[in-house]
Image: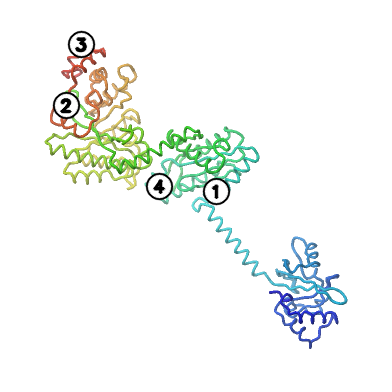
């Protein structure tokens, strides 16, 4: 509380009387003067015209180190200063407003400036008006406020920046992107949102450890920042997702160049703790104002474009289009319905026989996942398998298939059927994210089977790429462990991946399955015929059985027999059927290659030479 504002009316009138009587001399006997002198507030009086000091209390003299006589030789300009503008300070001192304290620096006798807050009043005396000032040392308060501001700035930085990479975070983006959109709208400029998601980062994080993953994210963030302009905004949204906001974009070509620089920068290997790691990025782009009028639309559409880049093989950039939005909604719908299907028993397993062409007997069954939707009927696997792999649902689905296969095999055994090896398809995601050897061991023991009952079908990339799973085991080590259990290993879709002879020499496999894409046009395409012939010849010399997939016509079968293919699978023999219909295959019967008079008519109409018909039916062609 200020001294003069709190001063009683009688005391203020007495002070005015003293000033009127003698400005230069204060009566030591006056009670009012004594109260003025003993006030803890540093108070002084100055002439309103000359601004010379005419009086000061003991608190002020003690604080400044001046005697009263020395103070009377000084003016307010000698005692106070302001670093930015002394002239303005003097004007404010001439016309003080008790409601608006002034900030200034006070010069004591020692010369060491003191930061003070000054409250001024006008005092009307008989001879001339006076100015009264109360000064308060605010040095400590200023330091405290400065520390508070610094602390607040630090907290604000922590709240709006990612602690791991130092980049702005999603809160920063939410605070600043709307303004960037508004500036672009006002100036009629383009604004580009690049949504980046690292490819297969989760695998690195799971297999190498979170510390390595964190260091990789830091290195990625630095490379992204190095490829962008000073005014561009680079944000880590969380996990392995980043946002780049390109301001003042001239055209789409500029956006494409920026995305290309980022992709190229991230394509090079990262040296993390002495280990070379490789990660790429899928980028989705949305443009203001074409793809959205606000932050929400722009981010959503760039995210949609990013998922489209994932679908296009990763490590590329895609620009948003309305068609992408429709596809994403369909994708999300399939994911939701697939989760529901797992809970409501819509998933099942069908089986397709693998036939020995010489004996025409079933030598194995391939288990195939089937989804029967209550409204739409059977959903094609190509519609949902990729989504299941991307979302991780393939792991519980794979466990479901394994359990169902063993349950069906147990029922076949109980009904007196002779069991044959059963193939299950395993994706790279399953091999990485689950301990498949341990799962097979536990499951087969629970049903009283040997692991030799099973054949695992893996694609070339799954079996030959050097990848680590969650338990730190390499995919190749997991395959070796499966072989040690007695599980047969087959390379599925052979010819569409690595197809390296060195891999076949190094890694023992029990069979190869020629992809149906080569079998489909085998009769009409010389290239496919040459490829299939080369695969069968190579496998025969390596003593590896070959299964041809997707056989639907007699002419395909005839060509495969001529090439020396041993095993076959396709609709010509049987479509995938439920477990209940497999009983007829498992009781020692032959596959009916004739299929009734209609099948013979079809064969004759297809152009097969009559002399070849007898050989096909007798199973002697090519043997």
Query: Dot 2: what SS?
Result: strand
The residue shown at (80%, 64%) is 91
Query: Which residue is label 3 attached to?
Result: 610
The image quadrant where one finds the N terminus is bottom right
Tell me the CA gap for discs 3 and 4. 62 Å
Looking at the image, residue 41 sits to the left or right of residue 479; the answer is: right
Q: How many marks?
A: 4
Query: Which residue is label 4 attached to?
Result: 205
Residue 174 is tagged as 1
Indicate which disc, 4 or 2, sits on the residue closer to the N terminus: 4
Q: Position of residue 623 (x, y in %)?
A: 18, 19
Query: Dot 3: what SS?
Result: helix
Tell me the CA gap for discs 4 and 2. 47 Å
Above or below for 260 versus 603: below
Query: Which residue is label 2 attached to?
Result: 361
Q: Nearer the viewer, mark 4 or mark 2?
A: 2
Q: Position of residue 47 (x, y in %)?
A: 84, 73
User: Badge 3: few (under 14), some or many (20 or more) residues near its Cα, within 10 Å?
Assistant: few
Figure quadrant of residue 396: top left
Q: Nearer the viewer, residue 527 or 43?
A: 43
Q: Is residue 537 visible?
A: no
Question: How is this picture coloured?
Answer: rainbow
User: Badge 4: few (under 14), some or many (20 or more) residues near its Cα, within 10 Å?
Assistant: some
Indicate which disc, 4 or 1, sits on the residue closer to the N terminus: 1
């Amino acid at each position: 509380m200020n001294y003069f504002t709190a001063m009683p009316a009688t005391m203020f009138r007495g002070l005015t009387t003293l000033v009127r009587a003698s400005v230069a001399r204060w009566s030591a006997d006056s009670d009012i003067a004594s109260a003025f002198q003993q006030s803890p507030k540093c108070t002084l009086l100055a002439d309103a015209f000359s601004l010379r000091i005419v009086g000061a209390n003991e608190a002020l003299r003690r604080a400044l180190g001046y005697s009263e006589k020395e103070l009377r030789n000084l003016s307010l300009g000698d005692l106070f200063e302001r670093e930015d503008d002394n002239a303005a300070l003097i004007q404010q001192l001439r016309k003080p407003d008790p409601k608006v304290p002034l900030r200034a620096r006070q010069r004591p006798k020692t010369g060491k400036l003191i930061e003070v807050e000054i409250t001024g009043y006008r005092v009307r005396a008989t001879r001339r008006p006076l100015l009264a000032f109360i000064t308060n040392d605010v040095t400590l308060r200023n330091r405290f406020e400065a520390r508070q501001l610094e602390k607040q700035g630090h907290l604000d930085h922590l709240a709006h920046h990612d602690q791991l990479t130092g980049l702005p975070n999603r809160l920063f983006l939410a605070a600043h992107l709307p303004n960037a959109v508004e500036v672009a709208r006002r100036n009629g400029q383009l604004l580009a949102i690049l949504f980046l998601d690292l490819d297969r980062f989760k695998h690195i994080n799971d297999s190498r450890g979170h510390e390595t993953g964190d260091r990789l994210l830091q290195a990625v963030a630095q490379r992204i920042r190095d490829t962008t302009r000073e005014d561009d905004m680079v944000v880590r949204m969380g996990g392995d997702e980043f946002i780049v906001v390109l301001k003042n974009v001239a055209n789409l070509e500029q956006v494409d160049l920026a995305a290309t620089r980022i992709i190229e920068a991230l394509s090079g290997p990262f040296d993390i703790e002495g280990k070379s790691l490789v990660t790429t990025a899928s980028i989705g782009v949305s443009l203001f104002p074409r793809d959205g009028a606000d932050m929400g639309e722009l981010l959503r559409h760039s995210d949609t474009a990013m998922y489209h880049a994932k679908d296009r093989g990763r490590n590329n950039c895609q620009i948003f289009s309305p068609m992408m939005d429709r596809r994403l909604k369909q994708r999300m719908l399939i994911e939701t319905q697939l989760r529901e299907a797992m809970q409501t028993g819509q998933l099942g397993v069908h089986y397709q026989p693998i036939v020995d062409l010489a004996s025409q007997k079933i030598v194995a069954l391939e288990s195939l996942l089937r989804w029967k939707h209550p409204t739409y009927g059977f959903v094609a696997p190509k519609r949902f398998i990729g989504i299941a792999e991307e979302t991780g649902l393939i792991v519980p689905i794979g466990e479901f298939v394994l359990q169902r296969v063993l349950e069906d095999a147990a029922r076949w055994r109980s009904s007196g059927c002779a069991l044959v090896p059963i193939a299950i398809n395993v994706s790279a995601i399953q091999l990485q994210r689950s301990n498949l050897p341990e799962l097979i061991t536990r499951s087969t023991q629970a049903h009283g089977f040997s692991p030799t009952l099973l054949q695992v079908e893996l694609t070339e990339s799954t079996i030959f790429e050097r990848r680590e799973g969650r338990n730190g085991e390499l995919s190749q080590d997991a395959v070796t462990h499966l072989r040690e259990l007695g599980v047969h290993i087959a390379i599925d879709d052979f010819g569409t991946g690595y197809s390296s002879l060195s891999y076949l020499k190094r890694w023992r496999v029990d069979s190869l399955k020629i992809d149906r894409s080569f079998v489909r046009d085998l009769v009409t395409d010389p290239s496919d015929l040459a490829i299939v012939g080369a695969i069968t010849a190579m496998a025969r010399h390596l003593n590896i059985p070959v299964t041809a997939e997707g056989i639907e016509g007699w002419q395909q079968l005839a060509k495969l027999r001529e090439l020396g293919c041993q095993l076959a699978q396709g609709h010509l023999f049987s479509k995938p059927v439920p477990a209940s219909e497999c009983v007829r295959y498992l009781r020692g019967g032959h596959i009916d290659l004739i299929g009734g008079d209609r099948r013979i008519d079809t064969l004759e109409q297809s152009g097969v030479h009559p002399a070849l018909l007898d050989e096909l039916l007798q199973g002697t062609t090519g043997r």
